[in-house]
Amino acid sequence: AESITVQELAEKLKKTAAEVIKKLMQMGIMASINQEVDYDTATIIAGEFGVETELKVAVDKEAILMAEPEDNEANLIIRPPVVTIMGHVDHGKTSLLDAIRETNVTAGEAGGITQHIGAYQVEHNGKKITFVDTPGHAAFTAMRARGAEITDIAILVVAADDGVMPQTIEAINHAKAAEVPIIVAINKVDKPEANPDKVKQELTQHELVVEDWGGDVIAVPVSAKQRTGLDNLLEMILLVAEVNELKADPERMARGTVIEAELDKGRGPVATVLVQNGTLRIGDTIVAGHVLGRVRAMIDDKGRRVKKAGPSTPVEILGLSDVPEAGDTLVAVEDEKLAREVAAKRQIRKREEELKVTNKISLDDLFKYI
Ligand code: GTP
Ligand code: MG
């Protein structure tokens, strides 16, 4: 499945594209410079040039590390939905996230309110819901650009006094592209100038027809300020989650996505990870992007130390060798050598890419003085 263009292959082998094309022709393959050849062919070509190629090995190792293991049907459990909040500036995304969190934290967890790890879980009627607390757009654009899909359900916040605005439309498009179900939270209904019907009417122009208008889009009137409609919203989230049958295998080794990461002065590299499948445990060897690590400690969204984190659980982890990037996939692996090799390869690649940028700049700078 892996392939490389003739041009890239030539560069890797330090040959001209013409030389590579000639070799391909000798093998009976007619190829142009931009054509893709598979790695088996590329390896043979490399061998023809007497180049002992690391190409295949490197790529395959990465593929082995990233290969999604099969869920064991017998182990499958229902996992909590992962919810992202999106919407136009000032329509109340942060207020809504805060209101949901603060009204659903039980007394014993009260101290956890101040804890911020980029995602949190609440319980409603005995069922958990995971909210990703980073700005919805960042979560969608940065992570989607990197191929990371973390959201099961998108909450589209539309202020009832303002209606559908440019970023509302942008959010709708993002959710649609990702094929993520949308629940509309019509916010600020406490305001005298609130006009929920106008919001519904405007939504139809973007192919979101709400239920009371004969469509299938759930819309819930809420006020983040007065904290009304929140239970109803959570109810609807659980309903949509149930329809979508979100399952995971907690017996697997963990796989997740880095939601945010930073270098903490005292604790070193710290990453908030959303475990999407499997269970992450203390002591696990992990790779997140170019970063190798071993889970030294885990802290949940309530600030408690935990020993393991199952599917849909957000958790802060310590024990990384460097700071990964938001959107990086995290995998826990048994094979430490493999983890080390892949992380090292990615580090080199990352450095090469950074160098390319610096070189380009210095070259530009150079021309300035000529
Ligand atoms: P950005 O992060 O800047 O895009 O904004 P946001 O969508 O997170 O909105 P935020 O929660 O910061 O709210 C914006 C303003 O609307 C604040 O002044 C809130 O107090 C106000 N607000 C949010 N929800 C409500 C509500 O339900 N009713 C009223 N009356 N005001 C609200
Ligand atoms: Mg905000």
Image (tube, rainbow, N blue to C red):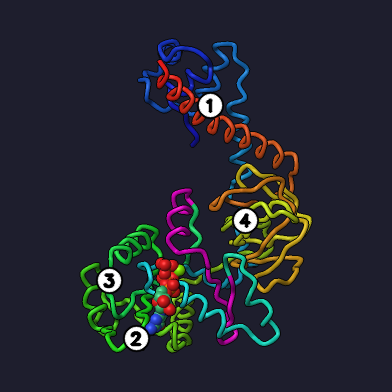
Q: Residue at x 70, y 71 (%)?
A: 303
Occupied quadrant, residue 367: top left
- The quarter of the displayed image where residue 255 is located: bottom right
Amino acid at the residue labelled 1? Asp
Horizontal and vertical percent position of residue 126: 60, 85
- The residue to which callout 4 is attached is 255
Mark earlier in primary sequence (2, 1):
1
Is residue 85 visible in the rendered image? The answer is no
- Is residue 349 shown above or below 191? above
Mark 2 sits on what residue? 189
Whether 102 is drawn above or below 41: the answer is below
Question: Does residue 8 appear left or right of residue 284 in this picture?
Answer: left
**Quick check: is the Cβ at mark 2 less than 8 Å away from ligand 1?**
yes
Residue indicated by mark 1: 40
Q: Which residue is identified by label 3?
A: 164
10 Å neighbourhood of mark 1: few (<14), some, or many (≥20)? some
Q: In front: 207, or 196? A: 196
Queried whether the magenta region covers residue 121, the answer comes back as yes
Closer to the camera, 265 or 38? 265
Label whose residue precedes the other's in the sequence (4 or 2):
2
Q: Earlier in the sequence, mark 3 or mark 1?
A: 1
Per the image, is 87 magenta? no
Along the polypeptide, which appears first: circle 4 or circle 1? Answer: 1
Residue extent of the magenta highlight: 120-147
| Residue at the farthest front position | 369
Q: Position of residue 210 (x, y in %)?
A: 28, 79
